[in-house]
Image (cartoon, rainbow, N blue to C red):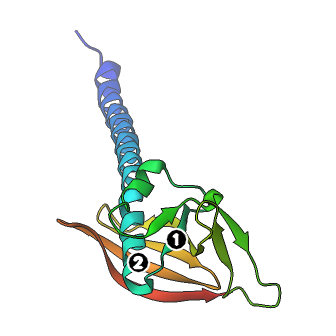
Amino acid sequence: MKTKEQHQIRPVFRVLLFFILLFVIGKVGLLLFGVYAHTQRDNIGEAIVRHHLKSASPSIIFVSFSRLEPSNGFLQRFEDSGVLVRKPSQGIFHRNPNDDGWSDYYIDNSTGQKGQRLDIGDISWAGPFKARVEVWYPGHSKEFAIARTLRGWIITHTERGIIH
């Protein structure tokens, strides 16, 4: 026969087990979202670069993610665009010392062409299908609101950011 104390321990054990399982499931969920977020970074970056290419029409652009160089796989996504998309290390940065930053540019090491820098900042997630990203250009920044659709990531809104 079970004593009265043994009956009282069992509900406490169940509650404790419930919270342990809840904690483990939460950690697994965060881990899975982290993996998802990391794999979507290049997709979001591609949408932002393609949006920039439509509006600015540069012949060459130097792209980074929070000042880190993109992968070669990311750069290969733009081979069909007619625009050279490069890593910043593939160019030389030039700053006009008498200017406020608007005329800063890069010179491509292999072609000698003048190009613009685009630094895609950290992604602020608003759920698995919406996010905001700040993108730094020479002299200013923009904040992009983006959403994932059946066709991929699209820009839903842009705001002019800091002018520096």
Q: Amino acid at mark 2?
A: Leu
> With respect to residue 72, does 66 lie above or below?
below
Residue 16 as seen in the image, left or right of residue 153: right
The residue carrying pointer 2 sits among few (fewer than 14), some (14 to 19) or many (20 or more) residues within 10 Å by Cα, namely some
Mark 2: which secondary structure? helix
Spatial distance from mark 1 to mark 2, Cα to Cα? 9 Å
Q: Quadrant of the N terminus?
A: top left
Q: Quadrant of the C terminus?
A: bottom right
Residue placed at 41% from the left, 72% from the top? Answer: 48
Mark 1: which secondary structure? strand
Closer-to-camera residue (66/21): 66
Q: Are marks 1 and 2 in contact (CB under 8 Å)?
A: yes
Residue placed at 62% from the left, 62% from the top? Answer: 88
What is the count of numbered marks? 2
Residue 87 percent coordinates (x, y) = 56, 59
Residue placed at 51% from the left, 75% from the top? Answer: 134
Kindly identify which residue carries mark 2.
53
Residue 68 as seen in the image, left or right of residue 49: right
Residue 128 percent coordinates (x, y) = 31, 60
Q: Amino acid at mark 1?
A: Ile
Residue placed at 40% from the left, 86% from the top? Answer: 55
Looking at marks 1 and 2 on the same chain, the residue that comes earlier in the sequence is marked by 2
The residue carrying pointer 1 sits among few (fewer than 14), some (14 to 19) or many (20 or more) residues within 10 Å by Cα, namely many
Q: Residue furthest front?
A: 111
Q: Residue furthest right?
A: 97
Closer-to-camera residue (80/4): 80
Q: Residue furthest top?
A: 1
Q: Is residue 56 visible?
A: yes
Kindly identify which residue carries mark 1.
61
Closer-to-camera residue (137/106): 106
Residue 111 percent coordinates (x, y) = 58, 65
Closer-to-camera residue (91/5): 91
